[in-house]
Image (spheres, helix red, strand yellow):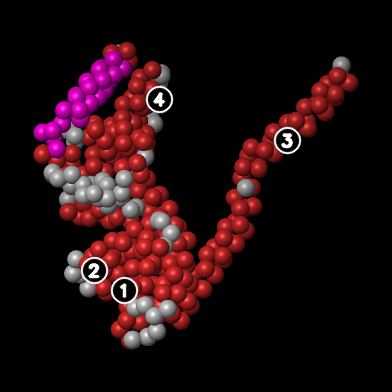
């Protein structure tokens, strides 16, 4: 029975993989069914290798996922994509299709492993394996968003210093933003500034463009910075002292965060020390003593 089950699962997996691969290669018709391609944005190498390898095989699932996604779920996935900095690179239907694909692949692997084992307990990891594989795209987007927020927090003090120099040299807010976008360090914050300036050139008011920048960044320091710029613009305040104070504050917060992480490092090292290093040390120390005692007893 198990042999027939394993053979059927392997046959279904091989057939589905061949069908998806062929449709991914000659999928000119699938592109029309799946809707427009993503707009030009970040390069595709930012996606993990597994995502890039599975992407041509998602063609059969994209139309179904595009129809079945509710507007609320689509908004949640789009928000996660924007926070991860992948807007213009992937679509919500691709994330849902990849989740289904990975869940199916994890279930196939779990069923194959369980069919080769004996007992009903071998089937217990089936559902957790499928759920873990299906949740991988969402977890990857969340991890990318966290790393992006960290990079934005590191780049913000330099951008503020650059804008401070521009403001004290006589440039206005728009000129300072242009200089920061042109000469700032390459990274997500600079990309957000370039996108905000493009929105301003397209006719969007500066206040709304900066608020959209803060929403895309999803970072509390950036929200505070945008709020301070809006307040200074509305009240006619001087930008130089305000930006210098913000830069000093965020640089101090960065140093405090580094000190806190350095103080947490010894605590995080306790578990590897107790679970891995100490037992090996005790074994190395106790083996000669035990061997000597056994030899002396004999």
Disc 2, disc 1: CB below 8 Å? Answer: yes
Q: Bin the neighbour count of mark 2 within 10 Å (Cα to Cα): few under 14, some 14-19, many 20 and up.
A: some
Q: Nearer the viewer, residue 213 or 115?
A: 213
Residue beneath label 3, please? Answer: 281
Residue beneath label 1, please? Answer: 174
Tell me the SS state at disc 2. Answer: helix
Q: Is residue 253 above or below residue 19?
A: below
- Residue for point 56% across, 65% down: 255
First along the sequence among labels 2 and 1: 1
Q: Bin the neighbour count of mark 3 within 10 Å (Cα to Cα): few under 14, some 14-19, many 20 and up.
A: few
Disc 4, disc 2: CB below 8 Å? Answer: no
Q: In the image, which is nearer the foreground, mark 4 or mark 2?
A: 2
Give the image location of residue 9, x and y in percent. Answer: 27, 20
**Residue at mark 2 to residue at mark 1: CA–CA distance:** 10 Å
Q: Is residue 242 magenta?
A: no
Give the image location of residue 16, x and y in percent. Answer: 22, 24
Q: In the image, which is nearer the foreground, mark 2 or mark 3?
A: 2
Q: In the image, which is nearer the foreground, mark 1 or mark 4?
A: 1
Q: Is residue 268 above or below residue 100?
A: below
Tell me the SS state at disc 3. Answer: helix
- Residue for point 34% across, 52% down: 84
Disc 2, disc 3: CB below 8 Å? Answer: no
First along the sequence among labels 4 and 2: 4
Q: Is residue 26 magenta?
A: yes
**Residue at mark 4 to residue at mark 2: CA–CA distance:** 59 Å
Residue 200's disc number: 2
Tell me the SS state at disc 1. Answer: helix
Q: Which residues are magenta?
A: 5-31
First along the sequence among labels 2 and 3: 2
Q: In the image, which is nearer the foreground, mark 3 or mark 4?
A: 3
Q: Quadrant of residue 115?
A: top left
Q: Nearer the viewer, residue 21 or 6?
A: 21
């Amino acid at each position: 029975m198990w042999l027939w089950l394993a053979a059927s699962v392997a046959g279904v997996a091989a057939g589905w993989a061949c069908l998806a691969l062929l449709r991914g290669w000659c999928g000119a018709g699938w592109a029309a069914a799946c809707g427009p391609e993503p707009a030009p944005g970040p390069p595709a190498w930012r996606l993990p290798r597994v995502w890039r390898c599975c992407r041509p095989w998602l063609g059969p699932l994209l139309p179904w996922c595009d129809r079945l996604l509710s507007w609320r779920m689509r908004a949640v996935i789009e928000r996660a994509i924007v926070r991860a900095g992948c807007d213009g690179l992937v679509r919500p239907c691709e994330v849902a299709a990849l989740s289904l694909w990975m869940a199916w692949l994890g279930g196939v692997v779990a069923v194959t492993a369980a069919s080769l084992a004996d007992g009903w307990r071998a089937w217990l990891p089936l559902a957790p394996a499928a759920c873990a594989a299906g949740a991988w795209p969402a977890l990857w987007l969340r991890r990318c968003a966290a790393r992006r927020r960290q990079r934005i927090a590191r780049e913000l003090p330099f951008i503020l210093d650059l804008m401070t120099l521009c403001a004290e040299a006589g440039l206005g807010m728009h000129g300072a933003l242009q200089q920061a976008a042109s000469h700032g360090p390459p990274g997500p914050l600079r990309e957000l500034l370039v996108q905000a300036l493009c929105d301003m050139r397209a006719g969007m008011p500066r206040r709304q463009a900066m608020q959209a920048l803060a929403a895309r960044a999803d970072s509390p320091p950036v929200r505070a910075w945008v709020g301070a710029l809006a307040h200074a613009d509305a009240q006619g305040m001087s930008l130089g002292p305000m930006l210098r104070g913000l830069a000093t504050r965020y640089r101090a917060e960065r140093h405090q965060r580094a000190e806190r992480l350095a103080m947490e490092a010894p605590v995080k090292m306790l578990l590897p020390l107790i679970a891995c290093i100490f037992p090996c040390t005790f074994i190395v120390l106790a083996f000669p003593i035990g061997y000597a005692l056994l030899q002396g007893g004999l």
